[in-house]
Amino acid sequence: MENDGVKPREGEKDHVLFFYLLVALLFCVFMRMLLVNSFTIVTPSMVPTIQPGDKVNAFRLLLFTRKIKANDIIVFYKPTDFTKDEVYCKRVLGTPGDRIGAVDGHCWNDRVLKPVGVVEEQEKLRWMFDGFFEFSDSYEVIPYTDTGWNIKNWGPLIVPAKGLTMSLDDFTRELYRKVIEYETGGPLDESLKEYTFRGDYYFAVGDNAMSSFDSRYWGFIPEDFIIGIVGGKRIRNK
């Protein structure tokens, strides 16, 4: 029985194959851009875990498949003025609702039994004389009020969580001022006695405990500022 269909010519077969290969390639590129972003680390703030010049992959997909945990390394937009113009890479110390702090240079999270961060680097911080930091303006930490908090000893504080209501006094008003103003879009009402957070936030620090510009200095990271969780093989700088 004869085939009534029209057979494609050899050249047409090649064009069809090329089209499908091109579509598959563009799809793979699009999915990689959507789900995975690669970044080159340019500062020593994550030493010894990540060296300057190393490349890391930030997996967006992980944000949808599991919760961010303490000790995860994340890539995010720096929230100093809540504009997405600078990208940082740090280790998560606190997740929404966590109670965190530092004693003698060592960070703690009351929901995590094991150490958070690199203990050896935190031990170096513990024994470094205070004058070293005073000369570099890195001794005092948030909220920059008369609390006595410093790079070695700070906290406890609670990381803002969606639905969490916080009583406001002179101390907490300054500690959470940026978060409240970010959420409300205006200056903080100084007469406000309490506030219920509308979103989830994180607190992240560098593994290089003595030399990292992180949440200790600029505060909390909104969840929607997080680009991805670092995973996979890190490409070492040669």
Image (tube, helix red, strand yellow):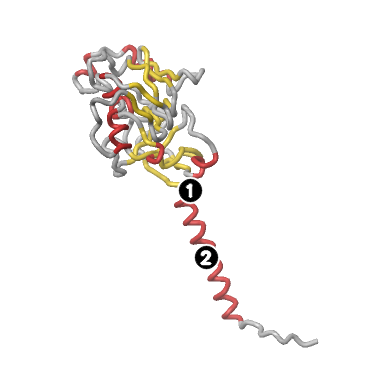
Identify the residue shown where x is 30% and y is 37%: 184
Q: Nearer the viewer, residue 35 or 155?
A: 155
Residue drawn where x is 24% and y is 22% of the image: 138
User: In which quadrant is the N terminus drawn?
Assistant: bottom right
Q: Which labelled disc corresponds to residue 23?
A: 2
Distance CA(mark 1)–CA(mark 2): 18 Å
Marks 1 and 2, the one that precedes in the sequence: 2
Q: Quadrant of residue 97?
A: top left
Dot label at residue 115: none
Which sits in the foreground, 148 or 163? 163
Classify 10 Å Cα crowding around label 2: few (below 14), some (14-19), many (20 and above).
few
Q: How many numbered circles are shown? A: 2
Amino acid carrying label 1: it is: Leu
Q: Is residue 195 visible?
A: yes
Q: Residue at x 54, y 62 (%)?
A: 24
Q: Secondary structure at mark 2?
A: helix
The residue where tag 1 is placed is: 35
The reply, left or right, for residue 185 in relation to residue 29 is: left
Farthest right residue?
Answer: 1
Q: Position of residue 119 (x, y in %)?
A: 43, 18
